[in-house]
Image (cartoon, grey):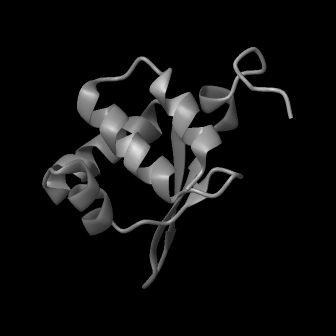
């Protein structure tokens, strides 16, 4: 879990379900913003069905909040876009 990424997601102006899906992915992310949860895991964490998760993932990718890489037979990896998530004025000092 990356607390840094999760705290930055809270500041984004997104619809409720999109923000919840993004938070569920951030909960699985490392500090570099890379995560690879399954659709079923995200749906379970959000309390919604898998189709809702897929629809919100498409919107988040289209809006540039995440990048998705498919690995055949292994699912997907999600990378948070640092320009969308952590702008220099919002990043905390090291």
The image shows a total of numbered marks equal to 0
| Residue at 68% in and 29% down | 86
| Residue at 71% in and 52% down | 32
Q: Is residue 89 above or below residue 64?
A: above
Q: Is residue 4 above or below residue 85?
A: below
| Residue 64 visible here | no
Residue most extreme to the bottom = 73
x and y percentages locating residue 73 in the rendered image: 42, 85
| Residue at 44% in and 52% down | 25
Residue most extreme to the left = 49
| Residue 6 visible here | yes
Quarter holding residue 35: bottom right
x and y percentages locating residue 30 in the rendered image: 63, 58
Quarter of the figure with the N terminus: bottom right
| Residue at 59% in and 44% down | 3
Quarter of the figure with the C terminus: top right
Q: Foreground: 20 or 18?
A: 20
Q: Is residue 66 above or below residue 91?
A: below
x and y percentages locating residue 54 in the rendered image: 27, 52
Horizontal side, residue 32 vs residue 48: left or right: right
Horizontal side, residue 56 vs residue 22: left or right: left
Q: Foreground: 34 or 56?
A: 34
């Amino acid at each position: 879990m990356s607390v840094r990424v999760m705290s930055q997601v809270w500041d984004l102006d997104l619809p409720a379900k999109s923000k919840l899906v993004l938070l569920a992915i951030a909960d699985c992310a490392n500090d570099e913003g890379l995560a690879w949860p399954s659709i079923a895991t995200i749906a379970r964490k959000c309390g919604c069905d898998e189709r809702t998760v897929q629809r919100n993932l498409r919107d988040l990718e289209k809006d540039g909040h995440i990048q998705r890489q498919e690995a055949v037979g292994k699912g997907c990896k999600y990378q948070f876009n640092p320009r969308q998530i952590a702008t220099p004025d919002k990043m905390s000092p090291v």
